[in-house]
Image (tube, grey):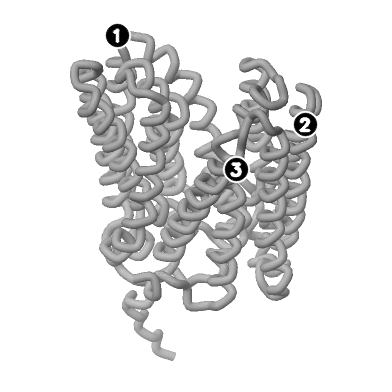
Amino acid sequence: MLRRSLPRRPEARRILVGTLLSAIGRGLTLPFLFIYLTDVRGLSDPRAGLVIGWYGAVTLALSPLGGTLIDRFGARRVLLPALLIEAVGTGSLALVDSTASAFGVITVVAIGSSAIWSGQNTILASLTADDERQRVYGLNFALLNLGIGVGGLTSGAIVDTARPITFELIYLLDAISYLTPALILLSLPHVGHRLADATTGAKGSSGGYLTVLRDRPFRRLVIFGLVLTTCGYAQIEVGFTAYAVRVVDVSPRIVAWALAGNTVMIVLSQLLVIRRMEGRSRTGALAVVGAVFATAWLILGAAGLVGTRNAVVAALGVVACAAVFGFGETMLSPVMPALTNALATDELRGRYNAMSSMIFGISGVIGPVTAGPLIGAADGKVWVAVVVGGCLAASVIALSLRPLLSAVQDGRTAADDTPATAPTPA
């Protein structure tokens, strides 16, 4: 299955290696930024929260600019500087010693992050054919989670709040990890250039994001993504954790095990899911993702009803919720970027990918803000009802997208299988 999922072009395979190596570095630091800023550098909880929130706001604000620059100059000229800026910013986190320096450094990190995701997706799209793109994006997501898991386990054995140098070490290692995809891209001089020639680009890019928003199928896909991620992904960091600790009454250690179970589910099942999805409707898969996410939240809600009456069952419910959620992610991760790039044109591919990445940024602001008040109402029952209803509504939106797509765009027919048009007589 791994051999079948690998892209045909060796350049794309090397890009995936860069994803894995940089993800290991990301995993070293991902769980510890809040702890580092508060317990090691002495920032108060509200100030640390503002710093992390500022990162999301800057990334979201600059993402559209990244998409425009990718279309105008090529992903290579945008991604290489972004990776270098990200490396400098991440390494500089080791030197933070005040609130002001934390805001300054996190701004640098956000500037680099704003174009990395859309740039990498654009390059992978340019190196893969439509019939393999879905498999490649799924493998990319599995490697990303594998790297984060390995990095998290490694840093868990290293960091110690009583020894600040341990945190400084992991941020320096994270900075080095961002240089690996940059070096790989430098070794591929013909990869990542502007996809459209000057004549076509000038004509096709007129209107910019307005042209992208006029694409009715893509607009429907964006609405689906906003609803699903707001009631799904955006709830993992705040809603899931708060409900598990405050309502289900499990310890933070159980939450950590649940998130580890989520990663294990993704790594072990991603290749099998990719294989089973070949030739099947992408919109149907997106509808199933909404149902799976809703099921995960229902399991968590049931664990909340059990609560302290049976601590073991409640803990198993929390872990099962995260694992089921991870299974849904294995269907979403290959389909969403593949469908985005099936709808995109070469002239606007950077903007399409940038707008797709903005979905997660917007929901990342809405989700945490709404989760707290909802969990505080009726012992979390209101929160469970809202997120379950939102995920099911996303399934309905996904099914409404199918009539707007061709069979090829929907993944039901390979591009190579489309019947040839009869030649016109001379």
Q: Is residue 208 above or below residue 38?
A: below
Residue beneath the point at 23% across and 28% down: 312
Three-letter code for the amino acid on which mark 1 is drawn: Ala
The Cα–Cα distance between marks 3 and 2, rounded to whole angstroms, is: 19 Å
Residue 236 in view, yes or no? yes
> Is 394 situated left or right of 8 in this image?
left
Three-letter code for the amino acid on which mark 3 is drawn: Ile
Q: Position of residue 387 (x, y in %)?
A: 33, 26
Residue nearer the viewer, 395 or 172: 172
Q: Residues within 10 Å of mark 3 (few under 14, many from 20)?
A: some
Q: Position of residue 179 (x, y in %)?
A: 71, 58
Q: Residues within 10 Å of mark 2 (few under 14, many from 20)?
A: some
Q: Quadrant of the N terminus?
A: bottom left
Q: Position of residue 278 (x, y in %)?
A: 30, 65
Give the quarter of the image for residue 334: bottom left
Q: Which residue is mark 2?
A: 96
Q: Of callouts 3 and 2, which one flags the residue occurring earlier in the amino acid sequence?
A: 2
Residue beneath the point at 29% across and 8% down: 378
**Residue 158, disc:** 3
Q: Please count the marks in the image.
A: 3
Q: Which residue is mark 1?
A: 378
Three-letter code for the amino acid on which mark 2 is drawn: Val
Circle 1 or circle 2, nearest the eye: 2
The Cα–Cα distance between marks 1 and 3, rounded to whole angstroms, is: 41 Å
Residue beneath the point at 75% across and 28% down: 102
> Is 263 situated left or right of 46 in this image?
left
Q: Quadrant of the C terminus?
A: bottom left
> Is 425 situated left or right of 302 in this image?
right
Q: Is residue 296 above or below residue 28?
A: above
Q: Position of residue 354 (x, y in %)?
A: 59, 47
